[in-house]
Image (spheres, helix red, strand yellow):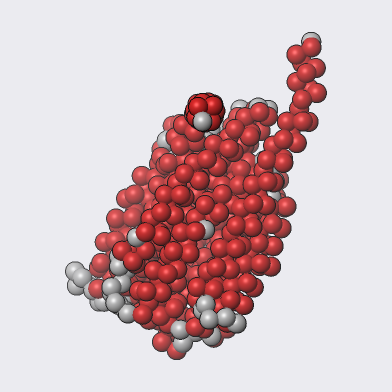
Amino acid sequence: MKTSKKESSSFVLHYLPDLKATISLSYPIIIAQMGLIAMGVTDTIMVGSLGEASLAASGIANAIFFFISVLGIGVLSIVPPLIATAKSRQDLSKCSSLFGASLQVGLGIGLLSMLVVGLMTWNFSWFRQTAEVSYLAIPYLQILAVSVVPMLLFLAIKSFADGLSITKPAMYVNFICFFLNIAFNWVLIYGKLGFPAWGLNGAGVATLLSRIFMTLGVALFVMYSGKIQRCLPSFKLQKISMPDIRKILTLGLPAGMQYVFEVGAFAGASVMIGWLGTSELAAHQIAINLASITYMLAIGLSAAASIRVGNALGEGQIFQIKRSGTSAFILAIAFMTVSCFLFINYSLELVHLYIYKGEAVEIAASLLVIAGFFQISDGLQCVALGALRGLEDVNIPTLFTLIAYWLVGLPLGYVLAFHTSLGVQGVWIGLSAGLTISAVLLTFRFYHLASKKRRQMKPLTEAIEHI
């Protein structure tokens, strides 16, 4: 027993510098990501007072919106490790051209996503929702469609700053805009200060305004920050660098598809749950809203892992690659274990933050218990994706996510929901299985590649030491 304690203590001390470095880099990213998702959470909480139909409409609309827009989010997620690698090589000209390319990619995908979301609203009957939910969801989704452009431009600028390890400005901007969103919601949902009460549509307008302010906030910081401007010696907004655009798209599109497969599975789950009834869909929206908060912790750690692994790769520090990834895995397990405890033990109390009565309350509480059990899997698969992006490995992980969510998770959820008595709980059990398979495959993939690079570098290291 003493030996075990000694080994455990030695392990923690061995990774302590890396754990500190990962926390220092990730906590502003986590808070910034929390700001993004917190707007959705406050929207859902404030819309909850309008009734189950508005809550259900918000859920299905947001599921469709993020299913379309998440491709752009995934593409831009490749920018931080690319910037980190260029910066570690002191290639500031490359940083400049990558920044311009990321803005152009973000704008292009944003406009395309807006058109696709608009197409979804014109053909909302595809989703076979109830008449009341469809009536409320369509105009709300149309407003959200416009917000995808400022959202992706914000992420393009934020991704550049994150790649330089300058993560606090986006955190501050998000913090301010979070409170702006609450104020806009209060005015526009309930009709305060002389404005009409727009209900669910008011929440959509509030989100749009908040995302515009977020983009303006980070853009102003980049323009007037000497620290960032020093990394942009040759930046010109109108200059088009096709090699860098191709680089971002070549690596980013597979990364984007990883997000599409995962978010698409949850969006598909929302559609299926809508077939079961309005109460079930409202319950799903509450549970997924809460689960998305803890997922933002994992997103922040994933971004930190991609940046630190990218730095190690760029500097040729092969032994640091594994340490950077492992430290992020340790923190993900620790944070998500706490989330698991809270979801399982305080499920009803958390649901009451949104709604106090109705059939949706008990259903949502049962879903939170299932969410508690998949927290660690969710955290690990998210961080592993980030670490693999730092190694510029995107194609095999994309295949893994396709298998986990679309060949296992979603079909299993459908069978359990409609061919057993489990109903909505069956859908969530299927999603849980998909997350677990993804976590196992991606984690093993990272350690396989880290060990492979270490073996490749060993002969070179020995030769240098011999000289």
Q: Residue furthest bottom?
A: 131
- Residue 265 is left or right of residue 154, and the answer is right
Total marks shown come to 0
Q: Can see residue 16?
A: yes
Q: Image height check: is 292 above or below 413?
A: above
- Residue 8 is left or right of residue 252, and the answer is left
Instruction: Give the residue at x 62% y 29%.
Output: 320
Q: Image height check: is 44 above or below 456?
A: below
| Quarter of the image where the C terminus is located | top right
Give the image location of residue 238, x and y in percent. Answer: 58, 48
Instruction: Give the residue at x 63% y 72%.
Output: 412
Give the image location of residue 186, x and y in percent. Answer: 25, 67
Instruction: Give the residue at x 54% y 55%.
Output: 378
Seen from the viewer's position, the closer of residues 238 and 366 is 366
Give the image location of residue 246, x and y in percent. Answer: 70, 50
Q: Residue furthest left?
A: 193
Seen from the viewer's position, the closer of residues 315 and 157 is 315
Instruction: Give the residue at x 49% y 83%.
Output: 276
Q: Image height check: is 139 above or below 322?
A: below
Give the image location of residue 369, x and y in percent. Answer: 44, 64
Seen from the viewer's position, the closer of residues 93 and 39 is 39
Quarter-of-image position of residue 267: bottom right
Seen from the viewer's position, the closer of residues 208 and 330 is 330
